[in-house]
Image (cartoon, grey):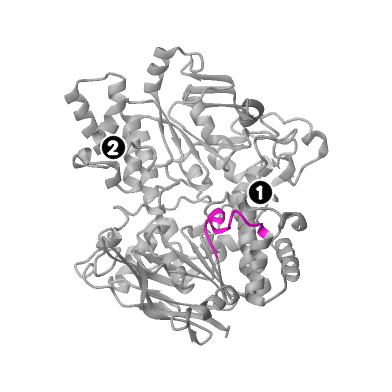
Amino acid sequence: MAERLLEVTDLSTHFFTYAGEVKAVDGVSFTLDRDETLGIVGESGSGKTVTAMSVMRLIPDPPGRIVGGTIVHKGRDLLAVSKEEMSDIRGNDVAMIFQDPMTSLNPVFKIGDQIAEVIRRHQGKSKRESWKMAVDLLAKVGIPDPEERVNQYPFEYSGGMRQRAMIAMAISCNPDILIADEPTTALDVTIQAQIMDVIREMQAQYHSGVIMITHDLGVVAQMADKVMVMYGGRTLEDGPVDEVYYNAHHPYTWGLLGSLPRLDETEKQRLTPIEGQPPNLLLLPAGCPFSGRCLYEMPVCAGEFPALEMVEPGHGVHCWIPVAEREKIRAGLPQFVHRVPS
Amino acid sequence: MSAILEVGDLKKHFPIRSGVLKRTTGHVYAVDGVSFAIQEGETLGLVGESGCGKSTTGRVLLRLLPATGGSVLFDGLDVMAAPRAALQRLRRDMQIVFQDPYACLNPRRTVKNIIAEPLRIHDIGTEAERKRRVFELLETVGLTVEHAERYPHEFSGGQRQRIGVARALALNPRLIICDEPVSALDVSIQAQMINLLEDLQKELKLTYLFIAHDLSVVKHISDRVAVMYLGKIVEIADSKLLYVKPQHPYTEALLSAVPIPDPRTERKRRRVILEGDVPSPANPPSGCVFHPRCPRMQPDPCTIAMPPLEVVGTAGADQKVACYFPTLYDPAGGSPASA
């Protein structure tokens, strides 16, 4: 058995705003093992970033607060440790790569200073040593002429190089867990391919667990071992990638897969979008957040959120539709949704 | 079928001014010699990474930006030389849908006013007729009459984009330039929008120039696709052909970089990972614009002159490529004969 790095149970993070309480994350549970990649997929407002920020304990309070649940890292509940301890954990044990590398790097400090600062803070190395390590790290993530580049400022880097520098910073203290929040959304596809490559290489080298947060089901298919599908702050379905892609059980997952134009489609198929508009997070129903847009909605759906049902080992779904009924519906869906692997 | 739009050697160079006197010290070669034709009723996709000049191309076509050189013929009429009145008449037939559904609608005007504005500018109909037309358009794009008196902030991104489409349709255009119309939208909403555009095309016999960076979307919606890199078209082909038999090394790299939402397919794929970044269009490389990143680069001829965009080898007339060393395919089978 692989080493369990993270166990999140029933996490709830709410924001208390003037307009009302926003349940950004509501009862989310997942685990992450060493060498494993978990993809968290969802559309804007689904709570995927807030989930990651909660694990890092970076939720701005006020207005946000983690109102329930546990986040256990190697036997220690991260929600119970002091702020000072958490600062040590961040960087050393859990590190994060953000979406926008321009706003997450400080524009007035050299790249080298920013990486070296992390190393000095967490490993107590000297200035000279940490600077040398920064150069090595830049070389490792594929920055050309690292001795030169380490002296430059973020504006002198291209988008892809900034994201490489962010990765260098994140891995500088050899963390167990690397959280990548839409690391390539701001980048072009050819640069995205480079960055995904770097993340995979770093994971193989450091044996970290990676949480890949994205809206792109292609990225998840490419990178992840297992996937969690979020909507309106809730997990609707999770499991090994093959299970979730080829044996999807939630109508929202079907909707996502049916919405995607695919590069490898040979005959042009009409997309099957999810009708309706994204949910208003202030007015979510007490039950399933997807009720209202779901084609198969029943009276019970909006009132109560369905309990976790395991359809296969490791593959869980929250849906009121009986399992036999779901399989029947799925069999009638277009090619890419119900296709069973050969 | 006849060409509705013919673009020949289109150029747009933006001057870089610096110093106190704001003297021109260089140029950004945003669009640098682009030629293509769009047939009536078809969708031509224009795909490329940021800074390749695809949006600038769209704007220059409509003369929202003056061109530096080249010609644009709409239905045989010269768009670049058209005097003011003729240009206004031309724009009835050529409309645009913008990328950012938040920035392209005036926040102080009601949806009704926004959609009726093109009608007002072109002085079409009476107030009552325009109102009827707005209601009709709202329904065409999947909104309702009740939405007419609301303001843009009351709508989600997908709904705003529908308002943008309704505005573009107001004058019954024949050609719509869609500039990244779905890239700001979530996947589920994006699919609604793509279906809407496809339905409208069928219903109203529209021609689209579909500009986007997402190759899966472009391939899905387009009949033909032009791939741009650093201000030039490097390959243009039937969209299915482009995916099955790409000839330009950049097209191949681009296709292989797009992740496919299918874990088993992903595990089997071979990826061509390009090194480095796109060079600055202010200082483009000599010769072929792609040569600094190209795996097939030979100093002679690649660094000396840009190869012309032409039919190569046994490829049909549907596929043109600008490369000295394109992938050639065996006409019988699908496998590359030489690379």
Q: Is residue B140 magenta?
A: no
Choose between A12 and B259: the one closer to the eye: A12
Residue that appears at 35% across and 36% down:
B165
| Residue A103 on the magenta span | yes
Does A320 sit above or below residue A217? below
In the rendered view, would you say A15 is above or below B202?
A: below
Query: Is label 1 on the same chain as label 2?
Result: no
Q: Residue furthest right?
A: B300
Q: Name the residue under label 1.
A: A156
| Region in magenta | A97-111
> In the figure, residue A239 lies in which quadrant?
bottom left
Q: What residue type is labelled 2?
A: Arg
Q: Position of residue A80 (x, y in %)?
A: 44, 83
For the stretch drawn in magenta, the main secondary structure is: loop
Horizontally, is A100 left or right of B282 in the view?
left
In the rendered structure, which amino acid carries the disc numbered 1? Glu
Q: Which residue sits at x=44%, y=80%?
A: A79
Residue B155 horizontal/vertical position (percent) = 29, 46
Can see residue A313?
Answer: no
Foreground of the two, A260 or B289: B289
Q: Position of residue A19 (x, y in %)?
A: 26, 60
Quarter of the image for the N terminus of chain A: give it.
Answer: bottom right
The disc placed on residue B108 is 2
Q: Which mark is residue A44?
A: none
Measure the C-alpha gap from mark 1 to mark 2.
39 Å
Callout 2: SS: loop
Q: Residue at x 53, y 55 (%)?
A: A103
- Of all chains, the one bearing label 2 is B
Left or right: A278 in relation to A89: left
